[in-house]
Image (tube, rainbow, N blue to C red):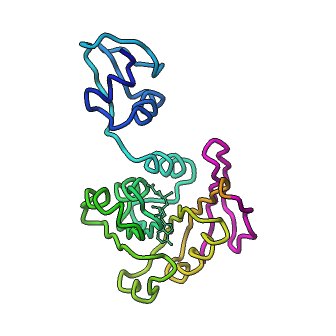
Amino acid sequence: MRIDHLLVKRGFFSTRQKAKEAIKRGEVFVDGRRIEKHSEDVNFSVKIEVLGEERPKGYWKLKNLNEKWSFINKSSRIIDLGSSAGGFLLYASEIAEFVLGIEYSREFEKELSKIRRENVEIIFEDAFRIDINSLRRYGRFNVILNDLTLKPEDSLKALSRFSPLVKGYALFVAKTGIDSKIPEIGWEIIAHEVSNAKKEEYFLLKIE
Ligand SMILES: C[S@@+](CC[C@H](N)C(=O)[O-])C[C@H]1O[C@@H](n2cnc3c(N)ncnc32)[C@H](O)[C@@H]1O
């Protein structure tokens, strides 16, 4: 049986895609040997070991970017716009002092409620409607993560709404797959990376 199928069948991962990604990261071992190809045929009764737990995709995306750009640390106080299934939120909460997630879709309530940590709060509201001043009760923030599934120009508008609460960095994920250009960014760009595969561009901005 193909190893990616077997990993799902045995309950290590919920989807084959997630199993494939873990194999790509070198986290899957069969009878002590690291698996390199997700299509490899293995015996049904092999001993399987998986390093690490299954995490939402965003977890790895943010981990990767933070390992390169080091903008999240233990004193970070973070706003996560568009928390979705909680990938960014989960990674950020493993490191940062506090993470406030903002998500308008109740579809993710169940998934997000699993991330019960003392340093995490989640608000279900629209980033364009939420009363920004009401968030002042959380104190100052020094990082904002913006991975909203919107046209880059609209996503930047959301970022502008929250910027009075933040002094530090913004990670802006521009969705280039959505038929829209990236407009002029009004903040200093500290770092920039293009992911053609994901149809995204990542900008690390300085917010003052
Ligand atoms: C690409 S997902 C974010 C993935 C997330 N960073 C992760 O790591 O799992 C974008 C999310 O933004 C949310 N979103 C889009 N527009 C929003 C808005 N106006 N207010 C709040 N959330 C919004 C969507 O519901 C979606 O869950």
Residue 107 in the image: above or below residue 43:
below
Q: Residue at x 46, y 33 (%)?
A: 21
Q: In which quarter of the image is residue 32?
A: top left
Task: Verify whether residue 31 appears in magenta.
Answer: no
Q: In which quarter of the image is the C terminus?
A: bottom right
Residue 158 in the image: above or below residue 199:
below
Residue 47 in the image: above or below residue 118:
above
Task: Verify whether residue 186 appears in magenta.
Answer: yes
Q: Which residue is drawn at 71% across and 74% down?
A: 186
- Magenta range is 179-208
Q: Quadrant of the N terminus?
A: top left
State the residue in front, 4 or 184.
Answer: 4
Q: Residue at x 55, y 79 (%)?
A: 163
x then y, percent, for residue 6: 32, 22
x then y, percent, for residue 14: 33, 38
State the residue in front, 207 or 18.
Answer: 18
Residue 27 in the image: above or below residue 202:
above
Q: Is residue 129 left or right of residue 171?
A: left
x then y, percent, for residue 23: 43, 27
Q: Residue at x 39, y 59 (%)?
A: 89
Q: Quadrant of residue 201?
A: bottom right
x then y, percent, for residue 69: 57, 53
Q: Which residue lies furthest to the bottom in this view?
A: 133
Q: How many numbered discs sit on the rendered protein?
A: 0
State the residue in front, 132 or 32.
Answer: 132
